[in-house]
Amino acid sequence: MLPQWGQGEGLTTSKTPTCVLFDENEQFIKFGYEAKREYIRGGNAKAKKTLLFENFKMELYGKELSEELMITAVNGKRMRALKVFTESLRYLKDHALNHINGHTFEQTFTASDFTWVLAVPAIWDASAKQFMRKAATEAGIVRESQMDNKLFIALEPEAASIWCKQLCSNGFVDGNSPNANYTLQKPGTKYIVADCGGGTVDITVHEVLAGGALKELDKASGNDMGGEQVTKNFKSCLKEIFSENVWNDFERRYPSDLQKLMYNFIVLKSVDEDAEISCPMNLYMLAQKQQPIENYFKNVQGVSWDEGSIQLSRAKMRSFFDESLSGITKSLKEIFKKDLSIDYLLLVGGYALSEILRKHITKEFGARCKVLCPALAQQAILKGAVMFGRNPAVVASRKSVFTYGIGLSGPFDAKKHKAEKKFTTEKAFCN
C-alpha cells in the first residue's frame, strides 16, 4: 500500500520533498508537498514569520552533533535540529498508521505493532545514526527498550541494492529491449549502487553470494554532490544575471516567490534540452527599477529574455551539472581503480531520473560495465528498506569503516633501518 504524494500539486509521486514547516512558535504545521504549498500560499509576509526547512538531512553531514545543534530555515531563522527531525518522523509515523488503519477492518494498529526501518545516507557517521535513533524515540516510533528489535538503521544504497538485485531485465530503464538479458541474481555478480539523491551521493559495492545474500566489497563511500548542487548553481546563475543587489533584495523580500521559482526549476532538471522558466513578477519589478530587463541578459552566455520568461540554452543547463557530475565521477573512479571486476553500475534515487546524469555516467563508465537505472529509481530505497527489515541477514558481510592497530617498535638494525627512525632508551630501537 504505497501512498501517492503531491496530488494537491497535480502530481502523483512515490516520494515527497524533504521539507517541514513550523509556525513562529515552532509548532509543526505541514510536511512535504503540503509544507511547500502552505509556505507559498501564505505569501511573503507570512513566509517571513514561519520556518521552512528543506533538505535538512544534509545538516547532519560532516558536523559534530549534539541535541542542541541548531539549523537554519530558508528565511534565516534557527531551530533545534532534533525537533525538526523528531516532528518530521512523528508526521511520517502518524501518516503510515492512519494509512494502514484506513485499510483494515475493525482492527487498529499502533507503532509498537511494527518493526520500523530508517534509511540513512551511507556517508553519515555513527553520531548521525545515533541522532536519528534519538529522534525516533522522541517521535514515538519506538521506546528505548525496543531499540534493538523494533528499529533498524539501513544504509540507503544498501537498501537500493537489495531491491535491485531481484529485478528482471524489464525492471530497468535500459533493459526494455527484446534482447536485453540482465540479471543481478547470479552468484558472483558484482555491482556498484550509486544512490543519487538531492543532497548526497552514496555508493556501495556488492557481490552476490550463493543463496542470494550480499557481500560488501568496499566500504560505503560518496559525497555531497547530489541534485541540490545543480539547483544551487542555477540560483548562482540568476544572481549573476540580475546582479547581487537585486537578487539579494528579492530573496529577502519575497521568499514565497523564490520557492515557486526553485520548485519550477526542479522539474526542468530531469530533461536534457533547452529550458524556459517564468520570471516572478516581483523579481521583474525589482530588476526593472534599475534598468531595462533585457540589459541584464546581455553579458551572460546561454541565457536570454523572452516576454516574461528566462530562456536557458541546453549548454547552459548542462553547465549547472558540471560540479556535481565531476564529484560523482571522481568517487566512482576511486572504486574502479581497485579492479573489483564490476559487472553493473546501478543509478538509483531521484537525481538518477536526470537524463544528463545518466548520459554522463554511461559515457564515463559504459565501456567498463553495464550502466542501468531501475524504472522505479525513486522507490528503490523504500522498497529495499522494507526487504531489509524483513531479513537483515540478506547483507552477509560489510567492510569496516574504521580499523585500529597498535604501533610496535623493534630492536634497531643499522643494516635494515633508517637512521632517523632510531631512538634510544636502555637499548636502541626502530620506531
Image (cartoon, rainbow, N blue to C red):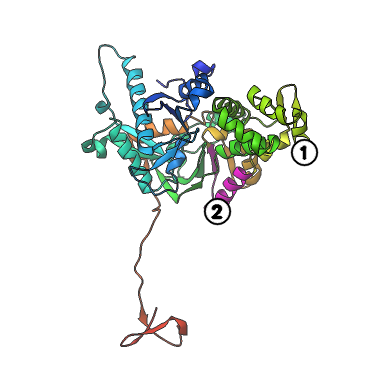
Verify whether residue 333 appears in magenta. Answer: yes
Quarter placement of the N terminus: top left
Q: What residue sits 62% from the left and 39% below the top? A: 233
How far across and down, in percent of the image, does residue 170 sit?
55, 28
- Is residue 175 shown to the viewer in this render? no
Alpha carbon separation for disc pair 1 and 2: 39 Å
The quadrant holding residue 238 is top right
Between circles 1 and 2, the one closer to the viewer is 1
Q: Is residue 170 left or right of residue 155?
A: right
Verify whether residue 12 appears in magenta. Answer: no
Q: Is residue 382 left or right of residue 376?
A: left
Q: Decide which of 60, 399 is in the foreground and name it.
A: 60
How far across and down, in percent of the image, does residue 85 sit?
38, 34
How far across and down, in percent of the image, does residue 399 sit?
40, 52
Q: Decide which of 171, 209 is in the foreground and name it.
A: 171
How far across and down, in percent of the image, does residue 227 sit?
56, 37
| Disc 1 packing (10 Å; few <14; some 14–19; many ≥20) | few
Q: Decide which of 35, 429 is in the foreground and name it.
A: 35
Please tell me the numbered disc located at residue 334: 2
Label 2 SS: helix
Magenta residues, start to end: 323-347
The quadrant holding residue 387 is top left
Q: What residue sits 56% from the left and 52% below the top? A: 336
For the residue marked with disc 2, what is the amino acid?
A: Glu
Quarter placement of the C terminus: bottom left
For the residue marked with disc 1, what is the amino acid?
A: Asn
The quadrant holding residue 172 is top right
Q: What residue sits 56% from the left and 35% below the top? A: 352
- Is residue 251 shown to the viewer in this render? yes
Q: Which residue is mark 1?
A: 299
Label 1 SS: loop
